[in-house]
Image (cartoon, rainbow, N blue to C red):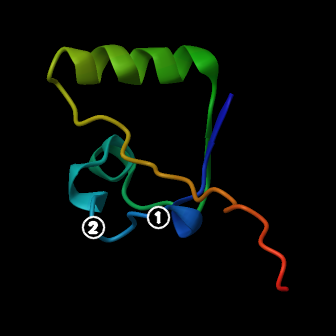
Amino acid sequence: MTRIDCDTCVVRGLACHDCVVTVLLGPPPELVIGDDEMAALEALADGGLVPPLRLVQPVDGPQVESA
């Protein structure tokens, strides 16, 4: 299962115009897509029928302790 939370997407605003979520559904605050649906969206994107998912989730950086 894929959880898509547009509010936490690092490229929100920059890549929304070319993301399958906003193209098909508009910008939702959060969306959960099952594995079968995700596979279908990937197949459509691979075939050039819709843009791919552009979701970029933030990652935690390294822990740096001060001296």
Report the front residue among 22 and 12: 12
Residue at 39% across / 67% down in the picture?
A: 12
Quarter of the figure that contains the N terminus:
top right
- The part of the image, by quadrant, that contains residue 44 is top left
Q: Secondary structure at mark 2?
A: loop
User: From what the image shows, is residue 45 above or below residue 10?
Assistant: above
Q: How many numbered marks appear?
A: 2
Residue sitting at x 24%, y 17%: 46
**Quarter containing the C terminus:** bottom right
Q: Position of residue 36 (x, y in %)?
A: 56, 14
* Vertical side of 20 occupied by 62: above or below: below
Q: Give the residue type that dot 1 points to.
A: Val
Crowd band around label 2 with a 10 angstrom C-alpha radius: few (<14), some (14–19), many (20+):
few
60 vs 18, nearest the viewer? 60
> Among all residues in the image, which is located at the extreme front?
67
Residue 29, located in which quarter of the rendered image? bottom right
Crowd rating for badge 1 (residues with CA inside 10 Å; few <14, some 14–19, many 20+): some
Give the image location of residue 55, x and y in percent: 45, 49
Give the x, y percent position of residue 61: 67, 62
Q: Residue at x 71, y 61 (%)?
A: 62
- Image height of 58 relative to 39, above or below: below
Residue 31 place in picture, x, y as percent: 60, 48
Q: Which mark is residue 21?
A: none
Residue 10: image tag: 1
Three-letter code, disc 2: Leu
| Element type at mark 1 | loop
- Identify the residue position indicated by label 2 in the image: 14
Q: Is residue 47 left or right of residue 52?
A: left
